[in-house]
Image (spheres, rainbow, N blue to C red):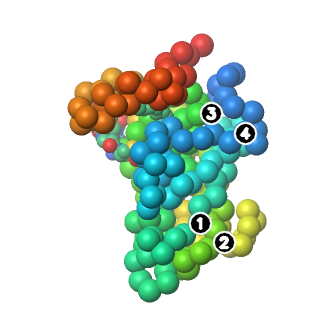
């Protein structure tokens, strides 16, 4: 499916997505990049606890079950929560590129309502890379990985260094993250590129 918004289409001359040689194997669970992350962290009671797996090429799949805490209308998921699930799935592509990147643009289409207790089957892949700009797209389906599309998004992520978080994050959380050897290991994994 090609992007609906021209600004989210990789420009002429953009590089094809390239899977990093040390990327996790297809099928491997990627784990959380930060325990306090609202999208994937185990330490957030009302977070999405989204679990992503490496796919083939530069792609990931993920599952997320809508909880009562995620409602916008009675019994239905909040659109912002669904956009977060797409954003998080797209963000997980960083593990395949071994590049840290933050969301610059995210355009979301909401095609069907998503009831509480629904499991959303997400997938995402990179469509092109132009310098620090990473173009990607994602869908969320109902009923199974081949089910009807409920939500989809096109995105532009921008590559940053770990310093981005150190410069902009609140001191308390940055200090705690840097004192956690497991967190430092996760961040370091992104700093070595071939
Ligand atoms: C010690 C703790 C470490 C913790 C981290 C550890 C591990 C992390 C590892 C992996 C992560 C794994 C999974 C992640 C999963 C999910 C994450 C969810 C993602 C998010 O939830 S993340 C939060 C929301 N996100 C932001 O918080 C961004 C705020 N923002 C900024 O921080 C700046 O805005 C920035 C850095 C984006 C750019 O700033 P900058 O100064 O570096 O660069 P600049 O502005 O020059 O842009 C360079 C080129 O991108 C183009 N460009 C930029 N923005 C654009 C836009 N919006 N639309 C169209 N084009 C855009 C320019 O036009 C230019 O293009 P050109 O080169 O062609 O001129």
Q: Which residue is mark 3?
A: 96
Tag 2 and tag 1, C-beta contact below 8 Å? no
Q: Which mark is first along the chain, 4 or 3?
A: 4
Neighbours of disc 3 within 10 Å: few (<14), some (14-19), many (20+): many
Residue found 44% across the figure and 76% down from its top: 71
> Residue 179, percent across and down?
38, 24
Q: Which residue is mark 4?
A: 28
> Residue 102, percent across and down?
40, 39
Tag 1 and tag 3, C-beta contact below 8 Å? no
For numbered disc 2, what is the local secondary structure? strand
Q: Which mark is first along the chain, 2 or 4?
A: 4
Q: Which mark is first along the chain, 3 or 1?
A: 1
- Estimate the spatial distance between the alpha carbons at disc 4 and disc 1, rounded to whole Å: 20 Å
Q: Which residue is mark 2?
A: 142
Q: Is residue 30 left or right of residue 56?
A: left
Front tag of 3 and 4:
4
Front tag of 4 and 2:
4
Q: Which residue is mark 1?
A: 65
Instruction: Between residue 177 and residue 120, name the one nearer to us.
Output: 177
Q: Which mark is first along the chain, 1 or 2?
A: 1
Neighbours of disc 2 within 10 Å: few (<14), some (14-19), many (20+): some
> Residue 70, percent across and down?
45, 70
Residue found 25% across the figure and 34% down from its top: 172
Q: Relative to 37, say whether 94 is above or below.
A: above
> Residue 23, percent across and down?
67, 28
Residue found 51% across the figure and 27% down from its top: 182
For numbered disc 3, what is the local secondary structure? helix
For numbered disc 1, what is the local secondary structure? strand
Residue 18 is drawn in which quadrant?
Answer: top right
- Estimate the spatial distance between the alpha carbons at disc 1 and disc 3, rounded to whole Å: 24 Å
């Amino acid at each position: 499916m090609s992007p609906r918004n021209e600004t989210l289409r990789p420009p002429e001359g953009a590089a094809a997505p390239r899977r990093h040689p040390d990327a996790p194997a297809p099928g491997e669970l990627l784990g959380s990049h930060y325990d306090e992350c609202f999208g994937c962290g185990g330490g957030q009671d009302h977070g999405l606890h989204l679990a992503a797996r490496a796919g083939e090429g530069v792609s990931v799949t993920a599952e997320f079950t809508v909880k009562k805490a995620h409602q916008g209308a009675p019994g239905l998921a909040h659109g912002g929560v669904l956009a977060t699930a797409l954003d998080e799935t797209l963000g997980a592509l960083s593990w395949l590129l071994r590049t840290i990147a933050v969301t610059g643009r995210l355009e979301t289409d909401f095609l069907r309502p998503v009831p509480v207790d629904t499991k959303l089957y997400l997938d995402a892949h990179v469509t092109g890379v132009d310098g620090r700009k990473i173009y990607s797209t994602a869908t969320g389906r109902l009923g199974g990985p081949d089910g009807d599309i409920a939500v989809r998004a096109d995105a532009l992520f921008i590559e940053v260094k770990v310093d981005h978080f150190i410069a902009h994050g609140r001191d308390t959380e940055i200090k705690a993250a840097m004192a956690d050897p497991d967190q430092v290991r996760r961040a370091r994994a992104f700093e070595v590129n071939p």
